Image (cartoon, grey):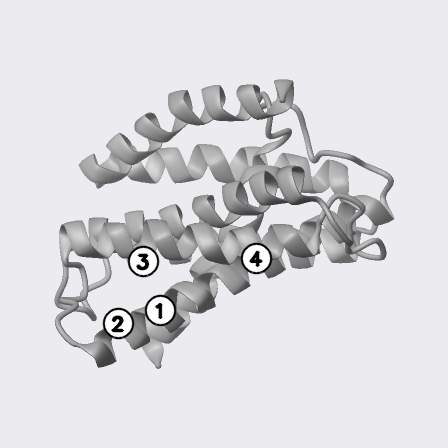
Amino acid sequence: MNELYKRILSSLVIAPIVISISYIGSVYFILLLALLFIIAAYELYNLMKNKFFFILGLILILFSFYSAYNLRYSTYLNINHFYLFLFIILICISTDIGGYTFGKIFKGPKFKIISPNKTYSGVAGSFTLSLIIGFIFLKIFDLFQINDLFNYRLHFFIIIFISLISQFGDLTISFVKRLNNLKDTGNILPGHGGLLDRIDGMIFVFPILNIFINYV
């Protein structure tokens, strides 16, 4: 519970700052991405013992931050792109919180080979909370103009898809940490660990959505 309180408090401090800078955009958003990239690259360097895999990971992170910038200013969809960017982040965050909370409350079988702390109940919680938060956000801002049953089904699968990728990213980083006998990628964020522990899902979500939205 102590770790949960730390996670909530640090999120309440960090989230408004990141969202505000993302909303303002311009050079401030670029500087924010640059700072986060430097921190993530440093943590990855400490995490990866194999330099070849470090370079591959660095390329992925670089493309992920480029994708985040591209989605924030994309012109391929006729919608407010700040809300699109915020929607993606909220789905990733709610996926993480849902998995953490449900896993702590309901416990149950774990993904022992991949990560000793990840549970099947956490997977269910990730999908559940991301759907709740996702549809509330879509309803408030009418991001994709939900007006019929087909759109509800489509957006259901969009949220599930984003949450699934985010969970895959979380499990991937957890597996890498386990291979290197590390609990966290760093200690910069109280309750979360390192920056990579916080954005592990987003690292995979942004590139895939960027390719899908802008090029597919």
Query: Is 14 situated above or below 143?
Result: above
Foreground mark, 3 or 2, reads 2
Task: Give the number of the disc on residue 156.
Answer: 1
Q: Are marks 1 and 2 in contact (CB under 8 Å)?
A: yes
Mark 4 residue element? helix
Residue 65 on image: x %, y %:
44, 50
Residue 76 on image: x %, y %:
20, 70
Q: Which residue was labeled with disc 4? A: 124
Q: Are marks 3 and 4 in contact (CB under 8 Å)?
A: no
> Amino acid type of disc 4?
Ala
Q: Is residue 55 left or right of residue 97?
A: right
Q: Quadrant of the C terminus?
A: bottom left
Q: Are marks 3 and 2 in contact (CB under 8 Å)?
A: no
Mark 2 residue element? helix
Q: Is tag 4's residue or tag 2's residue first in the polypeptide sequence?
A: 4
> Amino acid type of disc 3?
Asn
Query: Is 26 situated above or below 6?
Result: below
Q: Quadrant of the N terminus?
A: top right
Query: Is 174 situated above or below 28?
Result: below
Q: Which residue was labeled with disc 2? A: 152
Foreground mark, 3 or 4, reads 4
Q: Is tag 3's residue or tag 4's residue first in the polypeptide sequence?
A: 3
> Amino acid type of disc 1?
Phe
Task: Give the number of the disc on residue 70.
Answer: 3
Q: Around disc 3, counting alpha carbons within 10 Å, would you say few (fewer than 14), some (14 to 19), or many (20 or more)? A: some
> Amino acid type of disc 2?
Tyr
